[in-house]
Image: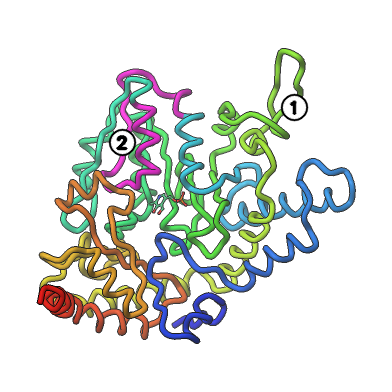
């Protein structure tokens, strides 16, 4: 099992003062010391505006920014110029929808997406569909959070122009077979956009192997800083896409009446780039490579199996998605206690130093589909330990009884 908690100052600091079991990693992860050091290094000895300064410090900033891009491209098996830096997954997906979408969609076309999509990979397509007179077609999941072959055959048709899906659902925890779905979509003549926000840290990303057309992810969900993410796109597609933001350093030439634009990726990076975070993201990727994807997978699978096993006999607890460990089961576990307000469960856990997420998880259509207003959600990361899981199970076991007791006490 991995033992890396001490690399994360926030976790180490909190654990000195009491207990912190941070299991809201699908929202954001904590940062290892090497990422914090990289941020400090940038601002203390590296800082200049990349792609602008002709002095030494400026040229070095440009080199480091581009070197960060190259490291991330290598990490995902992509070409350097296919990596567009964005603010996060949300901005990356909006960029594909706003720039690429209108170039391929016509009235009557269909955009296919799972009912479990995060709003970031749903609302941009919804807006585009409305603007172009297209239709959204939802892939429905079964009780185990999977999408059947029949469902894919029924919904992906010659009318499908875009299939947009998360590799891992941020609620159901299912890892969808993106590669197979992409193959099916490509046969139908559609393009595929993968939201890798919840898979990048946990499963890695090889864009050649996944064989999609676009992929998006955020650094902050993978030990990197917030404020930076990536849109990866096939070179030939990026080259055809118009910019959506205009300004400094994305232009080739500007006259009094006309502007021509840089090639990708700079065409999509108008204004001062987020070089410090790109530099720190490179440090995060280096750290991940040092740990190794296989080790991350094995560690998280062991934690998830222990968690699912431990909560299986807590009678009023219902898990959404697959309640058992499986190859397509990630370390995100959403649940509710029958008849209990999830907010009270979240507060109760917090009073024991356990941080989970409670709410709709930016997946409101899925909440409607599941017939619930909100859920609790545990999401693990490689720094979580078996001790964290055991403590979490113990507190969950007590939660309903203790909450009822405290409500009754307040009523007296
Ligand atoms: N897609 C999925 C599946 C997510 O879980 C999230 C965030 O939780 C996002 C997209 C949006 O990520 P960000 O807020 O970093 O843009």
Q: Quick one: label 1, few (<14), some, or many (20+) residues within 10 Å?
A: few
Left or right of 286, for residue 308: left
Q: Residue furthest right?
A: 55
Residue 66: image location, x then y, percent: 72, 49
Residue 273, picture quadrant? top right
Q: Which element carries disc 1, helix, strand or loop? A: strand
Quarter of the image that includes the C terminus: bottom left
Which residues, given as a range, are shown in magenta?
101-129
Left or right of 168, for residue 10: right
The residue singled out by tag 2 in the image is 112
Residue 153, numbered circle: none
How is the rendered protein coloured? rainbow
| Viewer-nearest of discs 2 and 1 | 1
Quarter of the image that includes the N terminus: bottom left
Residue 300: image location, x then y, percent: 39, 73
Q: Which element carries disc 2, helix, strand or loop? A: strand
**Residue 118 within the segment the image draws in magenta:** yes
Left or right of 319, for residue 156: right
Residue 252, numbered circle: 1
Residue located 36% across and 66% down the image: 379
Left or right of 227, for residue 326: left
Residue 325: image location, x then y, percent: 26, 70
Mark 2: is the Cβ under 8 angstroms from ligand 1?
no
**Residue 192 within the segment the image draws in magenta:** no
Residue located 51% across and 36% down the image: 95
Compared to residue 277, the image places residue 35 above or below, namely below
Residue nearer the viewer, 207 or 183? 207
Residue 399: image location, x then y, percent: 20, 77
In three-dimensional space, the C-alpha distance between marks 2 and 1, rounded to whole angstroms, equals 36 Å
Residue located 23% across and 80% down the image: 310
Can see residue 182?
Answer: no
Mark 1: is the Cβ under 8 angstroms from ligand 1?
no
């Amino acid at each position: 099992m991995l033992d890396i908690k001490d690399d994360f100052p926030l976790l180490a600091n909190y654990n000195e003062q009491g207990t912190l079991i941070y299991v809201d990693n699908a929202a954001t992860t904590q940062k290892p010391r090497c990422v914090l050091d990289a941020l400090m290094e940038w601002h203390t000895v590296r800082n200049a505006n990349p792609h602008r300064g002709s002095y030494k410090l400026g040229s070095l900033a440009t080199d480091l920014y581009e070197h960060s891009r190259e490291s991330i491209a290598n990490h995902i098996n992509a070409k350097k110029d296919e990596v567009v830096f964005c603010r996060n997954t949300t901005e990356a997906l909006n960029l594909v929808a706003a720039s690429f979408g209108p170039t391929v969609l016509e009235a009557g076309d269909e955009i296919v997406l799972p009912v479990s999509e995060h709003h970031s990979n749903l609302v941009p397509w919804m807006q585009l569909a409305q603007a172009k007179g297209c239709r959204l077609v939802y892939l429905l999941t079964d009780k185990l959070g999977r999408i059947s072959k029949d469902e894919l055959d029924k919904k992906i048709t010659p009318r499908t122009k875009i299939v947009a899906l998360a590799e891992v659902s941020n609620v159901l925890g299912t890892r969808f077979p993106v590669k197979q779905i992409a193959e099916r979509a490509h046969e139908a003549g559609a393009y595929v956009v993968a939201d890798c926000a919840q898979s990048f840290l946990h499963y890695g990303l090889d864009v050649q192997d996944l064989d999609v057309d676009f992929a998006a992810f955020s650094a902050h969900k993978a030990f990197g800083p917030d404020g930076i993410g990536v849109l990866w796109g096939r070179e030939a597609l990026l080259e055809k896409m118009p910019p959506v933001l205009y300004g400094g350093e994305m232009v080739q030439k500007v006259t009094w009446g006309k502007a021509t634009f840089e090639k990708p990726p700079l065409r999509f990076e108008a204004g001062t780039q987020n070089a410090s975070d790109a530099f720190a993201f490179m440090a995060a990727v280096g750290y991940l490579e040092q740990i190794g994807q296989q080790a991350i997978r094995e560690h998280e699978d062991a934690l998830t199996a222990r968690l699912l096993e431990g909560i299986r006999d807590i009678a009023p607890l219902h898990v959404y998605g697959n309640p058992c460990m499986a190859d397509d089961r990630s370390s995100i576990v959403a649940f509710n206690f029958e008849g209990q307000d999830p907010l009270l469960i979240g507060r109760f856990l917090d009073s024991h130093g356990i941080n989970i997420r409670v709410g709709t998880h930016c997946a409101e259509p899925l909440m409607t589909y599941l017939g619930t207003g909100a859920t609790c959600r545990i999401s693990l990361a490689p720094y979580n330990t078996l001790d964290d899981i055991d403590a979490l199970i113990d507190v969950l076991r007590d939660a309903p009884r203790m909450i009822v007791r405290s409500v009754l006490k307040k009523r007296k």
